[in-house]
Image (tube, rainbow, N blue to C red):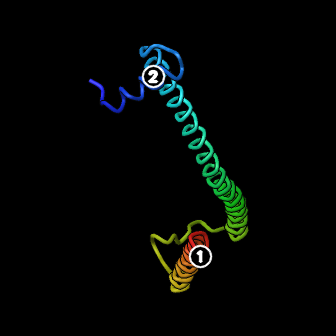
Amino acid sequence: MLREETIEKINKLSVNEAKSKSEIVDLAIHHFYKNKEEEHQFFIKTLSELLDEKMKDVMEVLNKIRVTSNVVDRETKMMLEFWNHYFFIHEFDAIATTDKVKTDALIEAEHVVKKIISERRQRKIDKEVGRKNVASG
């Protein structure tokens, strides 16, 4: 059963368009699915654009991480070569590893490094909060 209002609209369209009532219903259903498909395509396009925009940011961050890791890797390898040379020149047979001995200087250095990392992390958080405030303001 159709609502009275719907029946009146079908009758009115039938007269105005000079088509049968079944043709009007058929056209209405066709129009409905056509609009539904266009709406679906619009949502897909919009979502795709949003994802592309977000992926651009992610790729930028990943690129920075890659560059940084390359620098760290190169510097670590250089340090390994310097230390190897140092041990060779001084003919050390053993090494006092940190799992055996930790000097006061090493403990202090660890604290300094932790503090630096913490401060950088806080600056980064503050910077991100500032960006969000500017964007929402």
| Residue named by callout 1 | 130
Q: Quick check: 67 left or right of 31?
A: right
State how far apart marks 2 and 1 are (Cα): 51 Å
Which quadrant holds residue 42?
Answer: top right
- Which three-letter amino acid code belongs to the residue tagged 1? Gly
Give 7 or 56, whichever is nearer the viewer.
Answer: 7
Which quadrant holds residue 71?
Answer: bottom right
Q: Position of residue 104 (x, y in %)?
A: 51, 86
Q: Quadrant of the C terminus?
A: bottom right
Decide which of tag 2 and tag 1 comes sooner along the chain: 2
- Which three-letter amino acid code belongs to the residue tagged 2? Ile
Q: Quadrant of the N terminus?
A: top left
Q: Quick check: 58 left or right of 85?
A: left
Q: Position of residue 5 (x, y in %)?
A: 35, 33
Give the residue drawn at x 38%, y 28%: 8
Give the residue drawn at x 59%, y 78%: 123
Q: Within 10 angstroms of label 2, few (less than 14), some, or many (20 or more) residues? A: few
Q: Is residue 21 above or below residue 85?
A: above
Judged from this view, the residue extending furthest toward the front is: 15
